[in-house]
Amino acid sequence: MILRRTCLRVQSVRSLQTSSKALAAAAPAKNISPQAQPPSVKPNPSKPNLHDPLYKHPPSAAVVGTPLKGCQILKDQPEISALSDNQYPDWLWQLLDDPAPVEALKAFRKQEKKKREIYIAQLEEIERQKKLELIDLSQLPKEGEKRTEEERLEAKRNAMNQRWVVNRETEYDYPQFEMPPERNRKYHKAIRKEKIKQDNYLRAKGLK
């Protein structure tokens, strides 16, 4: 009776192992999904990509040689004249566009960069664990090999040194958390600068 129960337990364990191996083999490999487009940025066919070498921006309203009054900020200098359209940078034609799509694209790129950094960190952690496993296996004696106490301690010391070399990059690697904008000095500096501009405007108008 006891022998029969033992046989049944062995068969159940073997069936469990084979089923787990079959599930692991049937599981699809996890591939890196291509970068998705940001949901808030919709392609506008009426505005081609400025980085496209075949793109031609609309012609300027100022004819070549037209004096642009108010653009010269230096004293005793002649007025600046309009140049040909190919002498202006491409970003000049986007100054009056809505900045919302640009900000959404920046946020999307920042999020994608963060995901890429997390993915690379995970790959590095997997490689580190593999190196540590190889070090642990190298510490063990080979089949039929007999070691003295001094040789065993020497192998242990070598394994500890190798582990330290592998782990020294992550010894002081602590997770960094993003600081809220209220605790950022640049945030408050921008607010103060905007307040000074408003105060100067009101003083110039005589309202303050």
Image (cartoon, grey):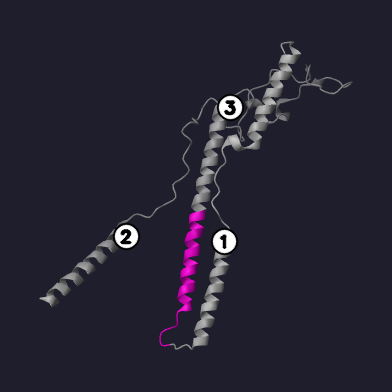
Query: Marks 1/3: CA distance?
Result: 43 Å
Query: Closer to the camera, 169 or 196?
Result: 196
Query: Closer to the camera, 26 or 174?
Result: 174
Of discs 1 and 3, which sits in the foreground?
A: 1
Residue bearing the label numbered 2: 24
Q: Earlier in the sequence, mark 3 or mark 2?
A: 2
Q: Which residues lie in the magenta part?
A: 121-144
Q: Is residue 61 above or below residue 170?
A: above
Query: Marks 3/2: CA distance?
Result: 48 Å
**The magenta stretch spans residue 153:** no
146 horizontally vs 154: left or right: left
Mark 2, secondary structure of its residue: helix
Q: Residue at x 32, y 60 (%)?
A: 24
Query: Badge 2 local density, few (<14 within 10 Å), some, or many (20+)?
Result: few
Residue bearing the label numbered 1: 171
Q: Is residue 177 above or below residue 171?
A: above
Query: Badge 1 local density, few (<14 within 10 Å), some, or many (20+)?
Result: few
Query: Closer to the camera, 113 or 149?
Result: 149
Amino acid at circle 2: Ala
Residue 32 in percent (x, y) is at 44, 50
Q: Residue furthest left?
A: 1
Q: Which mark is residue 128?
A: none
Residue bearing the label numbered 3: 99
156 horizontally vs 185: left or right: left
Q: Earlier in the sequence, mark 1 or mark 2?
A: 2
Amino acid at circle 3: Pro
> Cβ–Cβ below 8 Å for labels 3 and 2?
no
Mark 3, secondary structure of its residue: loop
Of discs 1 and 2, which sits in the foreground?
A: 1
Query: Marks 1/2: CA distance?
Result: 34 Å
